[in-house]
Amino acid sequence: MRAEGDAASRLRITCVHQGFELYGSDRCFIETVRTIRAAHPTARIDVVLPRRGPIVAGLEPFANDIVIAPLWILRRKNLARLATLGLLTLPIAIIRALRRIRASDLVYINTTVVADYLLAARLAPGRSIVHVHEIPEGVVLKVLRGLIRWSGANVVFNSRATERTYALPHGTTARVVYNGIAGPAEPNRPAYDGSRPLRVLMLGRISRIKGQDVLVEALASLPEPVRQRIQVRIVGSAFEDDAREQALVKRIAEAGLADQVTLAPFVADPAALYRWADVVTMPSQRPESLGRVAIEAMSYGVPPLVTAIGGLPEVVEAGKTGWIVPSGGPEPIAAVLADLVADPARWRDFGRAARARYESLFSEASAAEGIEAIVRTTLRRPRATDAARAADVPARPAA
């Protein structure tokens, strides 16, 4: 940890995140905190997390303090509990968040599901930024859009698809900033010529959104001679949903794919997997706000195969840096996989083009410029005085 020094003379920044693992949104959070630290090297930066986990080690070089505190997080799995007994804890959570916001010059809230901080942000205006990484649907979208509008926070969208989904009113201070990702110094060299099985990688949490089951069905639908020329690695775990993982294991066995498909748990550093892969796929069946895995693949010079949903078409240039297919079933994915093994020469230059697209749109430098621009805007924004409220809620951070 950094020495605290004279805290009163320094900019105080709080960064709040709903996760604790090292999946895409977690790594994005680390990269944003690193960006803020690089732009404000003398600031005091406190990070608030709901619990300890693998993310902590990645944050420690950039944070003065990592605070583990209860957060009122809107998760689909817990909505029924939050709407009943959880409401009893919400006022306390808002007060806790408000104290920390008032003690900060800037509060960066990563994702729209951190409800207590978004609700509290309206009571200490001019200090908060919310970074939107989700494309929800139906009632959830209405709730999250309402939270953002209520908060009055400045907004960062991670894609134009995300911005269109929320359709915030004119006058909202908002900016689209593609996730900036630290890629390797050198990309992979094209290695697939058809003389060995095509290596297909899928990374991500096992869920109905990501489409692991669709990828398995696509492979199962291929003729046996084609199937034998493809090797698939599915890497990731379900979040508190063992039944979903077991169902995937069962389906792989039933389809006779044990020799072609390998399931592996989440890994903190996927670099070796990207070095192994010829193609990375995101067969998502619900909107992805952007598609971090596809971007990471392109940084390694690995072309992505993605569905035409959410922000994924903003990442991949179809027919040049990868492939975009319709969502909704395994047939389009199966067709592309069959074409890839049939004619490797036709897509040999895709990896080189993918790396060039990553460097021009998704590098750390381009993202850092966008994040710092909205940080400067927020720090310059006039604030309503909090003096009248200070008697009710002491302006000191809660541990």
Image (cartoon, rainbow, N blue to C red):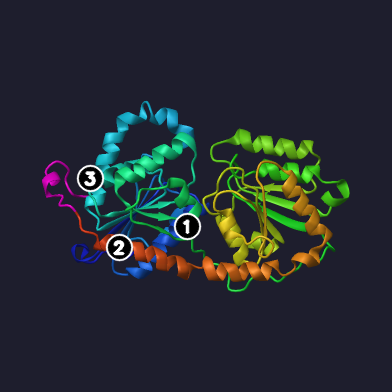
Vertical placement of 311 versus 349: above or below? above
Q: Secondary structure at mark 2?
A: helix
In three-dimensional space, the C-alpha distance between marks 1 and 2, rounded to whole angstroms, equals: 21 Å
Residue type pointed to by label 2: Thr
Q: Which residue is mark 3?
A: 123
Name the chief secondary structure element in magenta: loop
Mark 1 — residue? 28
Please tell me whether residue 382 is drawn above or below residue 188 in the rendered image: above
| Horizontal and vertical percent position of residue 389 | 14, 44
Q: Nearer the viewer, mark 3 or mark 1?
A: 3
Task: Provide residue 163's location: percent of width, then percent of height.
Answer: 45, 52
The stretch of residues the image draws in magenta is 384-397
Query: Which residue is outermost to the top?
Result: 84
Judged by depth in the image, the label closer to the viewer, 2 or 3, is 2
Q: Secondary structure at mark 3?
A: loop
Image position of 2 (left or right of 190): left
Which residue is the site of mark 2?
377
Asked if one can make out residue 49 in the rendered structure from this viewpoint, the answer is yes
* 377 vs 182, nearest the viewer: 377
Q: Residue at x 72, y 70 (%)?
A: 349
> To which quarter of the image does residue 194 belong?
bottom right
Q: Residue at x 78, y 58 (%)?
A: 340
- At label 3, the amino acid type is Leu
Answer whether residue 394 is magenta in the image.
yes
Q: Which of 281/89 is in front?
A: 281
Spatial CA span between label 3 and label 1: 27 Å
Horizontally, is 78 left or right of 72 in the view? right
* Label 1: element kind: helix
Disc on the earlier residue, 3 or 1: 1
